Image (cartoon, rainbow, N blue to C red):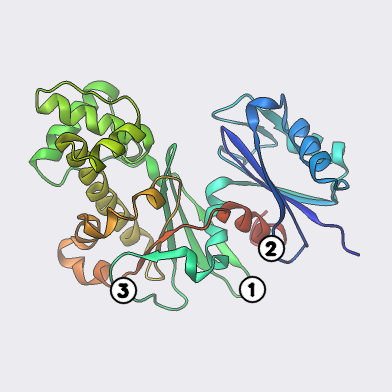
Amino acid sequence: MTRPALIGDIGGTNARFALVTPGAFDLQAIRTLPCAHYPTLSDAIRAYLDEVGAEVPSEACLAFACPVHNDEVRMTNNAWCFSKRQVTEEFGFELFKVINDFTAQALGVPHVDAKDLVPLGEGEAAPGSARLIFGPGTGLGMAGLFPGQHDWIPLPTEGGHVSFAPTDAHERDLLAYFHQHYGRVSVERILCGQGLLDLYRAHAHLAKQIAHYNTPAEVTGAARAGDPLARQSLERFLKILGDVSGDAALMLGARGGVYLCGGILPRLLDWLPHSHFRDAFADKGRMHAYTAHIPVWVVTAPWNGLLGACEALHNEEVA
């Protein structure tokens, strides 16, 4: 009997693990472990295997929310640091792949059930074309996905760090506020959880009002309760999301569709259809018809990163 492979999707706060039959996508024994409870990655792996009563696998693919191109991988938002070579030797892995978390998000998209894709507006995917995977969360992730002859080909990017470009006078005022606080303003400064809070504070500053809320969740809750400033901030967040994802779709040529991932947007499904997201996405001047015909979906699948790690395990396009 084939021994299950170890799959993981690891962020700054939580490590999500599962077992899977190599070459399949049947996620088993899914567990979420708080990273802070374990001094090292190896400790977390052993704790997971003990909890689910599994042998040490011979194969593993783990996705991390940090750069992974060197042998030494140092987590951005927790204290974990490890050598790929040493972990391979410690567990005796015959195959050990380490990928970026947004590479995993991209590779997971083709394996998401249709019921876990919520469409935003109209559009039809062009067969054989590039797809854009885009997602605000703790930061702003952006990746491409191309259909190869044999496997899906991911294109990792740092597109979340491109410069923010205002499209009207109000956004020029917002840019001035953000520039005063941060210097150069990337789109990630706005399109992330902290960015939503900062956007609310910027609106309060421009309106010469006191900012009453201190977390993104409080801003969202206040918007739902009818607070005018919070509502204006959330609506502007979604409009800028449309601007930036439309720009990214143009740059990538993403006629295969845009897939919105991350922890924020599934919580805003009641806002997105009535927001200016889709108008801003398509508002590209002479290229309006191009972007207007690109379909957009919100990915609500809870384990998309784990599905992507499954795909990467034996995908020859992923080193």
Q: For numbered disc 2, what is the local secondary structure?
A: loop
Callout 3 environment at 10 Å: few (<14), some (14 to 19), or many (20+)?
some
Mark closest to the chain's N terminus, 1 or 2 = 1
Q: Which residue is mark 3?
A: 123
Mark 3 residue type: Gly
Give the residue type at disc 2. Answer: Glu
Is disc 2 in contact with disc 3, using a CB cutoff of under 8 Å?
Answer: no
Q: Which residue is mark 2?
A: 316
**First-in-chain label (2 vs 3):** 3
Nearest to the eye among marks 2 and 3: give it: 3
| Residue at left offset 84%, top offset 47% | 93
Q: Secondary structure at mark 3?
A: loop
Of marks 3 and 1, which one's residue comes earlier in the chain? Answer: 3
Is the residue marked by circle 1 packed among few (<14), some (14-19), or many (20+) residues within 10 Å? Answer: few
Residue 150 badge: 1
Residue 176 visible: no
Q: Secondary structure at mark 1?
A: loop
Q: Is residue 271 left or right of residue 263?
A: left
Residue at the image point whose x is 24% and y is 61% from the top: 278
| Residue type at the position of mark 1 | His
Dots 1, 2 in contact, CB < 8 A: yes
Extreme-right residue of the structure? 1
